[in-house]
Amino acid sequence: MAWLLWLSMVVVVSAGPPAAAAETRGASYLRALEEALAGVDRPADRQGWAATSCAFVIQDGFDVVSIALTAAGTLWDTMSAAERNAFVAAVRLRALAACRQELVLRGRTRFEILRIRETSSGVSLTVRCSHEDGSEKVVTWRLRPGGAWGWLAQDLILDGGSMAGMLRAEVERLAARPGADAASIASALAGRATNR
């Protein structure tokens, strides 16, 4: 899944009427992403660099527990603490795998902020991503206050599809299998991450 679209980013804030506070918050999140990637030494192996960069991005810029809770749906309430930890770890692996794939395959990405608006829980940040390979995507980050950067992504919307929503649909398919339980679902999610 093409969730995460970062590599050597340039942030361009477009002219428009968003409130100054919301604009500052959204732009500050993208600057933190840019700095996280720029601060990593680039080895000759681009995959190694992408893996290291993504580890920083997911750790500091994403609310993986919130994404996992949304993805699990009603299954979350049936899980033990150990099963919840395993499920969150599986979701983190999936996010890392998608990030690495995007960083490796798409190359340099230029960000242009299209819209920033206040939400009940934080900020919604919509960005056009123009990739070195000639492709473009529009991505919306749903951010809440918190974390090392001051903001954490609770979800990403790409081409109308929610990252948490896509994971939830996958969890529901896995849960429908005979004999499925929380442990087997988390294991399947993690396995798909390592096979990407």
Image (tube, rainbow, N blue to C red):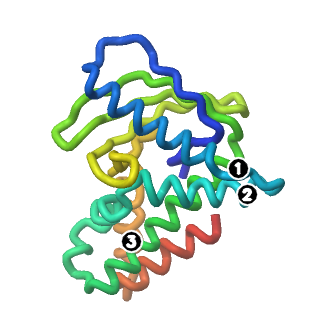
Would you name the residue on which mark 3 appears?
88
Residue occupying image coordinates x 45% and y 16%: 14
Residue 159 appears in view: no
Residue at which label 1 appears: 104
First in sequence: mark 3 or mark 1?
Answer: 3
Alpha carbon separation for disc pair 3 and 1: 24 Å
Q: Residue 175's x, y, as percent?
A: 35, 75
Q: Residues within 10 Å of mark 2 (few under 14, many from 20)?
A: some
The crowd level at tag 1 (other Cα within 10 Å; few <14, some 14-19, many 20+) is some
Q: Determine whether 182 is above or below 66 in the image.
A: below
Q: Amino acid at mark 1?
A: Val
Q: Nearer the viewer, residue 43 or 62?
A: 43
Q: Do callouts 3 and 2 mark residues in contact (Cβ within 8 Å)?
A: no
**In the image, what residue occupies the spot 39% across and 85% down?**
183
Direction from residue 159 to residue 151 in the image, left or right:
left
Left or right of 8? Residue 58 is: left
Q: Are marks 3 and 1 in contact (CB under 8 Å)?
A: no
In the image, taking residue 94 as reference, residue 153 lies left or right, namely: left
The vertical placement of 19 against 74, above or below, is: above
Position of 60 relative to 116 (above/below): below
Q: Label 3 is placed on what type of residue?
A: Val
Q: Which mark is residue 47?
A: 2
Instruction: Tell me the CA gap for discs 1 and 2.
Output: 6 Å
The residue nearer to you, when weighing 176 against 80, is: 80
| Circle 3 SS class | helix
Mark 1–mark 2 CB contact (< 8 Å): yes
Q: Position of residue 194 (x, y in %)?
A: 61, 71
Q: Which residue appears at 25% of the width and 66% of the height?
A: 73
Residue 76 percent across, percent down from the top left: 25, 73
Image quarter of residue 55: bottom right
